């Protein structure tokens, strides 16, 4: 009989493989962090498409409003959306609210790297994500590496076409459940405590360790149970979606690591990156100006 227990048993080997990936211990220098961030930011951004798809399915986001059919699931996803899209860092101050994606952009500016904002800008202007991914080379001067391209495309296709229980399984087991352990492996690297230019990055990681581990992960588990109920077919499909999401994450990490191995990320090889830094820094700082000036949140020393 398919249920949550059988799902967890079937995905356990993949979870173990993901959590033992060599990428975590490879992040041992500022240059390694720069390399990691310039590709990891794509998953920070596409994550929100899964979240917003679930909010659309589980709550009412149209007018005229009607009550949600599954009140517990609606409550759960609204809590997750609030924390991911408008995190006030437990200050209860509206002026402190910032999305985790914007916090990551701030961290990228701080460490001196950037990339994803051009893709997001194309989509903001109405370009379909498939076209934006393909045209990235023309606009940006370089292609998105295959592993990153495949990961983002799979995420957005899941958010676009997957059924609710499949999206929730991908969201839970590809993102919320493994993130605290994955990020703890990264934050344990000594470089993150030694270099002050990494303060915002450390804050981002620590926030996800705290929030996803204590709140969002357990909430997402409860939501998946609410959605699948006693429907064996849904549990089977959720299991397949969970496996796919974890496999894609493993491929994503492997791709980032292989790029670092094949093309060491040094100042001698970053002419394109230097160009991007000037453009992205300006866009990111403009994007974050209001939040920073009003909130008073400082990354320095916060983790």
Image (cartoon, helix red, strand yellow):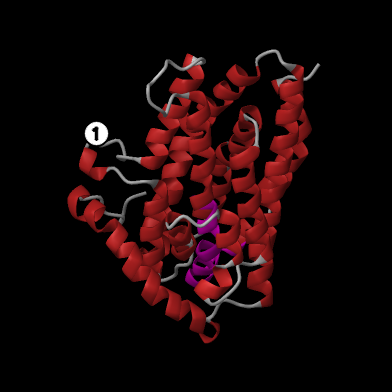
Taking depth in this image into account, of 133 and 104 the one nearest to the observer is 133
Q: Is residue 77 left or right of residue 157?
A: left
Quarter residue 223 falls in: top right
Residue at 47% from the left image edge and 61% from the top image edge: 122
Taking depth in this image into account, of 190 and 201 the one nearest to the observer is 201
Q: Position of residue 239 (x, y in %)?
A: 73, 31
User: Height in image: 176 above or below 290?
Assistant: above
Q: Position of residue 232 (x, y in %)?
A: 76, 18
How many marks are shown on the rendered structure? 1
Q: Position of residue 131 (x, y in %)?
A: 58, 60
Magenta residues, start to end: 26-44
Residue at 39% from the left image edge and 41% from the top image edge: 85
Q: Is residue 98 left or right of residue 42?
A: left
User: Height in image: 276 above or below 50?
Assistant: below
User: Height in image: 211 above or below 260?
Assistant: above
Q: What residue did someone put label 1 on?
A: 92
Taking depth in this image into account, of 132 and 176 the one nearest to the observer is 132
Q: Position of residue 120 (x, y in %)?
A: 46, 58
38 in the magenta segment: yes
């Amino acid at each position: 009989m398919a249920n949550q227990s059988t799902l967890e048993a079937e995905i356990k080997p993949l979870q173990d493989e993901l959590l033992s990936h060599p990428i975590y211990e490879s992040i041992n220098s500022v240059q390694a962090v720069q390399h990691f961030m310039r590709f990891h930011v794509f998953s920070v951004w596409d994550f929100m498409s899964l979240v917003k798809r679930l909010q659309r399915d589980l709550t009412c986001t149209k007018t005229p409003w009607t009550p949600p059919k599954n009140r517990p699931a609606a409550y759960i996803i609204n809590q997750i959306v609030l924390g991911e899209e408008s995190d006030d860092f437990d200050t209860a101050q509206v002026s402190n609210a910032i999305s985790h994606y914007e916090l990551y952009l701030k961290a990228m500016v701080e460490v001196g790297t950037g990339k994803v904002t051009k893709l997001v800008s194309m989509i903001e202007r109405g370009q379909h994500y498939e076209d934006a991914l393909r045209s990235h080379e023309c606009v940006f001067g370089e292609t998105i590496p295959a592993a990153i391209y495949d990961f983002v495309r799979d995420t957005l296709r899941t958010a676009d076409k997957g059924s609710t229980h499949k999206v929730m399984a991908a969201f839970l087991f590809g993102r919320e459940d493994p993130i605290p352990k994955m990020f703890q492996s990264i934050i344990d690297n000594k470089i993150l405590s030694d270099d002050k230019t990494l303060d915002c990055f450390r804050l981002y990681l620590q926030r996800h360790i705290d929030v996803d581990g204590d709140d969002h992960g357990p909430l997402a588990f409860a939501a998946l149970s609410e959605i699948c109920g006693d429907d064996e077919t849904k549990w089977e499909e959720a299991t397949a979606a969970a496996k796919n999401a974890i496999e894609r994450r493993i491929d994503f990490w492997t791709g980032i690591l292989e790029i670092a191995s094949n093309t060491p990320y040094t100042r001698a090889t970053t002419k394109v990156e230097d160009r991007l830094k000037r453009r992205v820094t300006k866009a990111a700082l403009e994007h974050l100006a209001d939040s920073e000036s009003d909130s008073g949140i400082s990354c320095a020393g916060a983790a």
